[in-house]
Image: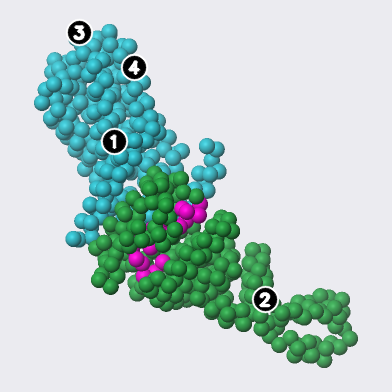
Amino acid sequence: MNATTVAVRAGVSRGRIELRQSATSGQDLWGAAFFPAVALVVMYLLRGNTVPGTDFSLGSQAIPGILAMNIVLNGVTALAMMLTLDREDGTLLRAKATPNGMVGYLVGKVISRSGMVVLSVLIPLIPAALLFDGLQIGAVSSWLTLAWVLALGLVAVLPIGAICGAVFGSVQSLGLVTVPIMGLVAISGVFYPVSGFPEWLQGIAQAFPLYWIGLGLRSALLPDALAVAEIGESWRHLETAGVLGAWAVAGLLVAPVVLRRMARRESGSSVAERREKAMQRPM
Amino acid sequence: MRYGANDVLRGVDLRVHRGEVLALLGPNGAGKTTTIEILEGFRRRSAGEVSVLGTDPDHGDEAWRARLGVVLQSWRDHGRWRAAELLDHLGLYYAPYGTPARPRPYDTAELLALVGLTGQAGTVIARLSGGQRRRLDVAIGLVGRPDLLFLDEPTVGFDPVARQDFHDLVRRLSGLEDTAILLTTHDLDEAEKLSDRIVLLAGGEIVADGTAAELAARFSGKAEVRYSRDGEFFTESVQDATGYVRELFARHGEAIGDLEVRRVSLSEVYLAMVREFESGQHHAARELTGVGA
């Protein structure tokens, strides 16, 4: 068997091991579940309000948006943070010291992160289905739409997470990623239909994947009548695929270059230097 | 060899033979880690020629990488993994590079036994003690059955017991299937104990190269002569102390006082060198040792 194939297979098993570690780690689960849990509670309290122009619960309408937020938080922020930590503790250097180790590392990371993203979409659906009315989770078509939006969304956001993780040197400076993402969450129609916002704000929101993942998930999980609350009163599947596809292509073009540059710079002394800085920081 | 704006290494010529343990000895900042990182292919040199296992590390491919084992000063990676799980995993990558004469990877259980971690096979790595963690790092360095193993300052921060255990381990390794070991240390005692040959590095230059016995003979053959001449004090390091003193008296006669002649031990030479180096005067240190030129 070819050495690269071996490394890809090793990466698959690596991904499984890492996913098991994340899914059984209280710290990881807390990190992944905190925002969505708060959002679900808030939406449950707001379930009596209705989406403007319909008699549909605003709370139920926000569920797909919260799931989209989960995808972005787990795919971008958490991935970036893992890459940064892996550089700080030498995991990445270990991969570099191993033949084809980088291939295995990246395959493993993509699998474990994708797994966490999928879990972060599926698990909240269970309480959501019990607490909120009107979600179309019984239909096969819902799951098909959910599957392609989720898959395309992953390919669009994971490279962004990888790039952020490679560019930012420390966990602290990752705040520069988290803050704009929270801003995007606020303007991308996660909690409230974006059609109520000023047009320039709608424009910004539509430039980023979060809005489109949210729109795609709403089209999967909400009744078709709810499309009236969207821009153009349509689910715009074609545009969704187009924008997410464009982000995916751009990300997949840029990420390998940035990752390769990052890997080249790894050495024992750069790891030691980062650790020293990390230790000087007040925790 | 240049790194950044300064020449950190000049004319460093290292040869490690099959099955040999070579110690790169020098004070902190002498360029040991830089040297080893260049050899490992983790750092680019600005000039000069380097060949490791017949390949320039800057252009080393994965097959070359598979023949190296790397143990850095301190790893903290894979803290959530279990010891045996990580060895099993990392071993996978080496399988395609095995040959009938040198099957890769090493068997995990055998490797854990070799480094004395059989009882910790199922332990989560973050819960290992410092000494156990370092032994695991050595096991990882060996998992691909390397032709050449790098050990960078392997015992820094160890208590005496962990240190002794580690020394025993390295001695066991040196007999192992033709694996050459290049280890760096700032501790002369460690270098003497573990290595077949010592290369003394200071200020980016090799100031001595030989077996511990050779170095001891070369340096302790020297003596330190202290004296005063017209009230001014001098210290000289000379090969032939008797001849030197005879000439001193012949030339200056009554003006010489406070005469003192001492044999210089290897550890004294090394200490003096380190001290000089740390005060930024490593050229003076070179004169003192006077070797390598």
| Residue type of the residue flagged with mark 2 | Ser
| Residue type of the residue flagged with mark 1 | Met
x then y, percent, for residue A146: 17, 29
x then y, percent, for residue B224: 73, 79
* Classed neighbour count for the residue bearing mark 3: other residues with Cα under 10 Å, few (<14), some (14–19), many (≥20): few
Residue to which mark 1 is pinned = A116
Q: CA distance from mark 3 to mark 4?
A: 21 Å
Which one is closest to the eye, mark 3 or mark 4? 4
Residue to which mark 2 is pinned = B265
x then y, percent, for residue A143: 14, 28
Asked if badge 1 and badge 4 are on a common chain, one would say: yes
Secondary structure of the residue carrying numbered label 2: loop
Residue to which mark 3 is pinned = A55
| Residue type of the residue flagged with mark 4 | Val
Report the coloring of the rendering. Answer: by chain
The magenta segment is B130-149
Q: CA distance from mark 1 to mark 4?
A: 22 Å
Secondary structure of the residue carrying numbered label 1: helix
